[in-house]
Amino acid sequence: MSQTTPAAQRRVGHGDLFTDHMISSVWSGPDGWRPTELVPLAPVPTHPGTLGVHYAQVIFEGLKAHRQPDGSIAVFRPWENAHRFQRSARRLAMPELPQEMFIDAIDRLVAADADWLPAGDDELSLYLRPVMYGSEPNLMLRPSDEYRFLLLAFLAGGFFGHRPDPLSVWVSRTHSRAMPGGTGDVKCAANYGPSFMAQREAAAAGCQQVIWLDSAERRWVEEMGGMNLFLVRGAGPGAEVVTPALTGTLLPGVTRDSLLTLAARTGYRVRQEPVSIDQLLADCASGAVTEMFACGTAAVVAPIGVLRDDKGEWTIGDGQPGPTTLALRERLVDVQHGRAPDPDGWLHPVRLPGTAR
Ligand code: COI
């Protein structure tokens, strides 16, 4: 570990404390994927005419490794990310990385940099960032003839800080994240950069995040920033846990899917359905919607306290994290950290050097 201050004592952000190594491989037309290499983390020489940089032929993933009670490390649902990485590759006319190669890359990098992940701190995880881009130096408007796959790892704290206050969220009425027939349901870099301007508008309105509406009618709630959204109707064991249905313009999040499973297993009524913004705001005003939260690998479960647009402000419940939100967060984190049963086999244990595990 190259840092001098113990990581746990610092404010750990998102992608500012990279570990010592990375995994690298290159695909080229005649040869396919070369064997992956574990190498020291270092800049990768990039030709100024690299196709992926100019035409956004770039996909990525995000997943996390967590310490387990016995000191081992397990990665949460990596096969789901491997599968989505292949879907994203197909959508951007890129070669698919075999799922076994994806998992093997994760195993090797986590084993090499395991010391970065301290035990006994729920807030810290090893965030794994696979990325693939068209690396051919050529600017014809066509898919690249060469690709680089990299796997990076960094120590991650809470995306919104340590036990963050509920978020204030701006309902964007002018910008869109995705369109029918576009790339909203895959994880490509081009879904993220264009969101920064709306993010700035949200900040100017005193909000930390943006809610995206569908681009066709500007009527249906889709996502928040780079995360999926949930709302809760009612309270207690009979509460209804609702998330916008996957219409083809939403990213099918691994955390979203995990929470749907855990919520149903806890006994909540679970629904995936279209959520209209007008109904949502009316339900926040009447108190029918009692809680809202966003979820994703980075943010885990992030409570939302307030929705705002150019016409008004709606407080959700009492504006504080609600009991269903907190219960679902705890259930998820407990599985990830090996403190709760894992009946679905979501944990992928990593063999660490010098251990029998
Ligand atoms: C994640 O939640 O891990 C994401 O990839 C979304 C964003 C932080 C990039």
Image: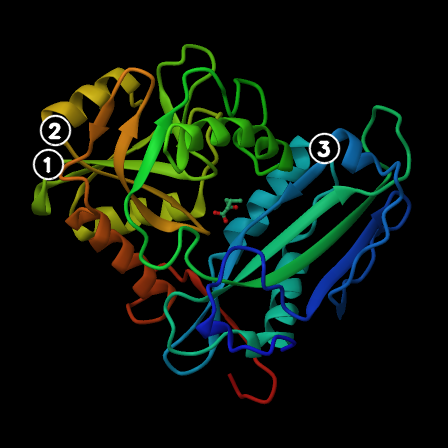
From the image, tell me which residue sits under label 3: 56
1 or 2: tag closer to the N-terminus: 1
In this view, 85 is above or below 177? below
From the image, tell me which residue sits under label 2: 288
The amino acid at mark 2 is Ala
Q: Are marks 1 and 2 in contact (CB under 8 Å)?
A: yes
The amino acid at mark 1 is Gly
- In-image side of 244 versus 40 (left or right): left
Q: Nearer the viewer, residue 204 or 185?
A: 204
Say which quadrant the N terminus sits in. Answer: bottom right
Q: Nearer the viewer, residue 88 or 330?
A: 330
Q: Nearer the viewer, residue 23 or 174?
A: 174
Q: Residue at x 83, y 57 (%)?
A: 34
From the image, tell me which residue sits under label 1: 234
Give the CA distance from mark 1 to mark 2.
Answer: 6 Å
3 or 2: tag closer to the N-terminus: 3
Q: Position of residue 12 (x, y in %)?
A: 48, 63
Using a 10 Å C-alpha cutoff, classify the residue at mark 1 as few (fewer than 14 neighbours), some (14 to 19) or many (20 or more).
Answer: some
Q: Position of residue 71 (x, y in %)?
A: 44, 82
Regarding residue 18, the answer to whether it shows in the image is: yes
Q: Residue 120: which quarter of the image?
A: bottom left
In this view, 224 is above or below 36? above
Give the CA distance from mark 3 to mark 2.
Answer: 42 Å
The amino acid at mark 3 is Ala
- In-image side of 75 versus 129 (left or right): left
Q: Residue at x 62, y 64 (%)?
A: 18
Using a 10 Å C-alpha cutoff, classify the residue at mark 2 as few (fewer than 14 neighbours), some (14 to 19) or many (20 or more).
Answer: some
Q: Position of residue 94 (x, y in %)?
A: 74, 37
Q: Nearer the viewer, residue 265 or 143?
A: 143
Q: Is mark 1 within 8 Å of ligand 1?
A: no
Q: Residue at x 45, y 35 (%)?
A: 225
- Kindly state the secondary structure of the residue where label 2 is placed: loop
